[in-house]
Amino acid sequence: MERRKFITLTAVGGMAVSFTGISCTSRPAYYNVLDKPQQLSYICDAKTIRDIGMAYRAQTPAESGSDRLADLLSEDSTGHAVSSSSDNTFIQTLINQKITDDFEKGHTVLINGWILSVTEARQCALFFLNNK
């Protein structure tokens, strides 16, 4: 293959890959906080969190997709999506408050012997999807 043709094909291929990647990165900056069950990670290892997530997805098929889980986790107490420009600290505080509210309201699930808030279970499910 001629050098010029090789360079052209490489450049075109690189642009195609970068454009494909650009269209897939529509997630908000705080997305990396949503799949980290911070409180649960103090007592569980990654495998246990993945197992909980897999079981929750099987138990709740309507919430088994990563976009759906992220939407549910990033809703405020009124059910509205938080701003995509929210910072990680705000999102972590929101998640912690949602966990507390879930326990106070009895919004819990029993998965693999663990009694978890629905928010924690959703975080585990998203963790499972993002760390298969």
Image (cartoon, grey):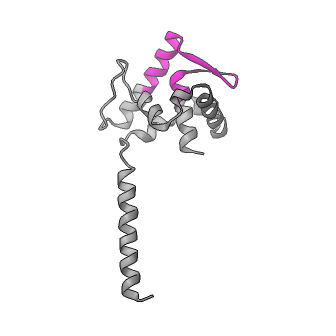
Q: Is residue 46 above or below residue 108?
A: below
At x 35%, y 54%, the residue is 22
Q: Is residue 35 above or below residue 15?
A: above
User: Is residue 116 one of those drawn in magenta?
Assistant: yes
Q: Is residue 3 above or below residue 13?
A: below
Along the horizontal axis of the image, is 64 left or right of 49?
A: left
**Of all residues shown, which one is farthest toward the top?**
105
Give the magenta range.
95-122
Q: Determine the image quadrant of residue 52.
A: top right
Along the horizontal axis of the image, is 7 left or right of 37?
A: left
Q: Position of residue 86 (x, y in %)?
A: 32, 35
The foreground one among 51 and 41 is 51
**Of all residues shown, which one is farthest toward the bottom?**
2
Q: From the image, which quarter does the C terminus lie in? A: top right
At x 52%, y 32%, the residue is 123
Is residue 42 among what the camera can see? no
Number of numbered labels in the structure image:
0
Q: Position of residue 28 (x, y in %)?
A: 36, 41
Q: Position of residue 57 (x, y in %)?
A: 59, 31
Q: Position of residue 26 (x, y in %)?
A: 35, 45
At x 40%, y 70%, the residue is 13
The foreground one among 99 and 3 is 3
